[in-house]
Amino acid sequence: MSARVDPDWEYVPLRIPADVSRSNAAAQLSLHAEFGGWELHRVQRYTDGTRRVMLRRKLRKTSVPLPGLPT
């Protein structure tokens, strides 16, 4: 999955390690949504337990950087 080219949206891929619990991952993603304006676009879960998440948000003139999650 790669970042899509869309003039109205910006996308960012994240990889969540297998050792991160579902509740901790949800809390981290909630922080991205609340403070960065990101929304969940897609989640893929792999057999090793890692998750690949694609976040998106409407393009804006001032950009809030994405806090550190492992990518």
Image: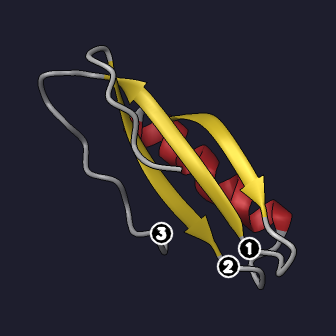
Helix, strand or loop at label 3? It is: loop
**In the rendered image, the vertical position of residue 36 relative to residue 22, given as above or below:** above
Residue located 39% across and 69% down the image: 68
Write down the quadrant of residue 66 in the picture: bottom left
According to the picture, the residue beneath numbered tag 3 turns out to be: 69
The dot on residue 17 is 2
Helix, strand or loop at label 2? It is: loop
Task: Find the distance from the CA under tag 2 to the CA under tag 1.
Answer: 5 Å
Nearest to the observer: residue 4 or residue 15: 4
Would residue 37 be seen by someone viewing this image from the given angle? yes
Q: Amino acid at mark 3?
A: Leu
Nearest to the observer: residue 32 or residue 3: 3
Helix, strand or loop at label 1? It is: loop
Q: Is residue 44 left or right of residue 40?
A: right
Q: Nearer the viewer, mark 3 or mark 2?
A: 2
Proximity of marks 2 and 1: CB atoms separated by less than 8 Å: yes
**In the rendered image, the vertical position of residue 46 relative to residue 32, given as above or below:** below
Residue located 77% across and 80% down the image: 18
Disc nearer the start of the sequence (2/1): 2
The dot on residue 7 is none
The dot on residue 50 is 1
Q: Position of residue 20 (x, y in %)?
A: 74, 77
